[in-house]
Image: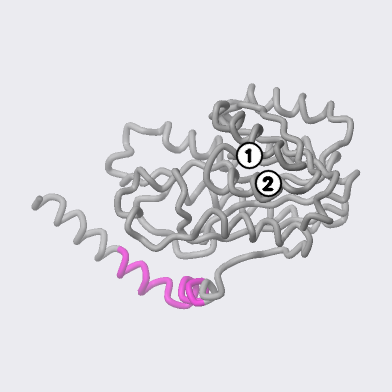
């Protein structure tokens, strides 16, 4: 990985915590130029001090990528890079767990998730594709297993937005390959990051370590592997197709029971 990354420029979104932070630290001993993008400037400045004690170089660009103006400012900065851009790690994401019945007056839940999980990476990539093509670059999408499985209740905003970008990237992949741009999608189960903390139940569920995910991203950088996903995911994909009707009935009954228990409580 070090040999692959030395001297390259790597954009990491969602870089101030979780997977993005772990991946940035993983590259500390390379001579890469890391461009860290997230809302939390203080965290990224502290990371810059730590990482530059090794050999990597860090640029901090604070931005809320839900904001189109901030995305435009980021793109203006990236296009003036003298060394171009080699790798985009699209990691920034927003998760919302909320029943539709409690979302009726919360249209902004859907605009926020689409803004960050779908529109932000698309706006960035549409502008950055020519830069990546010049460097035989790579796009790495940190996705979710939900994009490949039967959709579940309470996660409509999150699942729709993540699946939208996953579909866009898979559709664009053959065209990108013709421009010598490789793509990698990581389909992840639950990962122990700050994003899962608002969902109380997730705090006790088994979850991957961000460091483990960061190592998978690092592996993808030199293998150019197209897809990373848990070995057992094929069972869920198969069941999602073959047992779609029974799964719909099972999910309906589980939701009905949950709503009944909530009303009784």
Examine the rendered structure and indicate whether residue 178 appears above or below residue 111: below
Q: Which mark is residue 138?
A: none
Q: Residue at x 34, y 53 (%)?
A: 203
**Is-magenta flag for residue 44?**
no
Asked whether, in this view, residue 10 is left or right of residue 227, the answer is: right
Residue 256 location in percent, x, y?
22, 59
> How far, Cα to Cα, is label 2 from label 1?
6 Å
Asked whether, in this view, residue 252 is left or right of residue 228, the answer is: left
Residue 247 location in percent, x, y?
37, 71
**Is-magenta flag for residue 245?**
yes
As helix, strand or loop, the secondary structure at mark 1 comes to strand
- Which residues lie in the magenta part? 235-251
As helix, strand or loop, the secondary structure at mark 2 comes to strand
Examine the rendered structure and indicate whether residue 150 appears above or below residue 23: below
Examine the rendered structure and indicate whether residue 74 appears above or below residue 147: above
Which is more toward the observer, 258 or 233? 233
Residue denoted by label 2 = 89
Residue denoted by label 1 = 13
Q: Let me know if residue 175 appears in the view.
A: no
Dividing the image into 4 quarters, which one contains the N terminus? bottom right
**Label 1 environment density (alpha carbons within 10 Å; few <14, some 14–19, many ≥20):** many
The answer to the question of whether label 2 and label 1 lie on touching residues, with beta carbons closer than 8 A, is yes
């Amino acid at each position: 990985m070090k040999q692959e990354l030395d001297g390259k420029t790597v954009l990491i979104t969602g870089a101030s915590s979780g997977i993005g932070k772990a991946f940035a630290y993983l590259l500390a001993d390379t001579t890469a130029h890391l461009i860290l993008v997230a809302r939390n400037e203080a965290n990224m400045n502290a990371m810059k001090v730590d990482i530059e004690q090794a050999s990597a170089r860090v640029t901090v660009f604070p931005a809320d990528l839900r904001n189109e103006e901030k995305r435009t400012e980021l793109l203006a900065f990236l296009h003036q890079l003298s060394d171009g851009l080699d790798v985009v790690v699209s990691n920034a994401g927003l998760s919302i767990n909320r029943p539709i019945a409690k979302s009726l007056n919360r249209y902004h839940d859907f605009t926020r998730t689409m803004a960050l999980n779908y529109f932000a990476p698309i706006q960035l990539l549409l502008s950055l594709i020519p830069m990546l093509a010049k460097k035989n670059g790579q796009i790495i999408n940190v996705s979710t297993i939900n994009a490949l499985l039967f959709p579940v209740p309470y996660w409509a905003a999150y699942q729709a937005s993540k699946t939208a970008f996953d579909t866009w990237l898979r559709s664009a992949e053959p065209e990108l390959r013709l421009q010598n741009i490789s793509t990698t999608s990581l389909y992840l189960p639950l990962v122990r990051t700050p994003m899962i903390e608002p969902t109380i139940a997730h705090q006790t569920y088994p979850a991957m370590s961000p460091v483990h995910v960061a190592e998978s991203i690092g592996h993808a950088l030199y293998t150019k592997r197209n897809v990373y996903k848990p070995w057992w995911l094929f069972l869920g994909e198969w069941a999602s197709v073959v047992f779609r009707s029974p799964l719909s009935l099972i999910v309906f009954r589980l939701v009905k029971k949950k709503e009944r228990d909530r009303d009784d409580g």
